[in-house]
Amino acid sequence: MSKGRVVQVLGPVVDIEFDHGHLPDIHNAITIVSKAENANGRDISLTVEVAQHMGDNLVRAVAMSSTDGLVRGADAIDSGAPITVPVGPATLGRVYNVLGEPIDNKGPADRSLAYPIHRAAPLFEDLATSTDMLETGIKVVDLIAPYTKGGKIGLFGGAA
């Protein structure tokens, strides 16, 4: 794991400088932990994801939560791996945040099977050719406007 320091904060975008030769890979998770310097300050515990190599040992990362209170010079530690989230039957009925941490007050998540949030698309041979209905569990949607599995759908939103 390599260590860097925050050099610029632009809203949810954070630029981090690392030592020469220790640049994290694209999509790696970087943890920034900073203790408040005074009683009015706020402790920072932030995970960012590397989005771009900027050159000169700089990476540009996107924050997964608020950057309020983040200052230049804060220590940043590369995890050496991308953000992973739990998958499989153990996740059914649970609510998770973008980092794969449970936020439903039902205890810790079963992380025996976890995948990175950026994965390659399935092979063409592995795709199904049949048309199956996606059961949403929302009575009105399943009855009035059923959706097919595998397509891109927009269920919520719109002005009308």
Image (cartoon, rainbow, N blue to C red):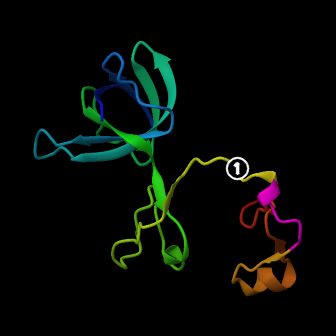
Can residue 156 be spotted in the picture?
A: yes
Task: Indicate the amino acid at tag 1.
Answer: Ala
Extreme residue in the top direction: 56
Q: Is residue 144 above or below residue 30?
A: below
Q: Residue at left 41%, top 20%?
A: 58
The quadrant the N terminus occupies is: top left
Image-based side of 91 in relation to 151, left or right: left
Is 57 in the magenta? no
Q: Is residue 106 above or below residue 31?
A: below
User: Where is residue 158, by image quadrant?
Assistant: bottom right
Start-end of magenta stretch = 125-131
Q: Residue at left 49%, top 76%?
A: 90
User: Where is residue 38, by image quadrant?
Assistant: top left
Of 151 and 112, nearer the camera is 112
Secondary structure under tag 1 reads loop
Image-based side of 103 in relation to 45, left or right: right
Residue 81 in the image: x percent, y percent? 42, 43
Is 129 in the magenta? yes
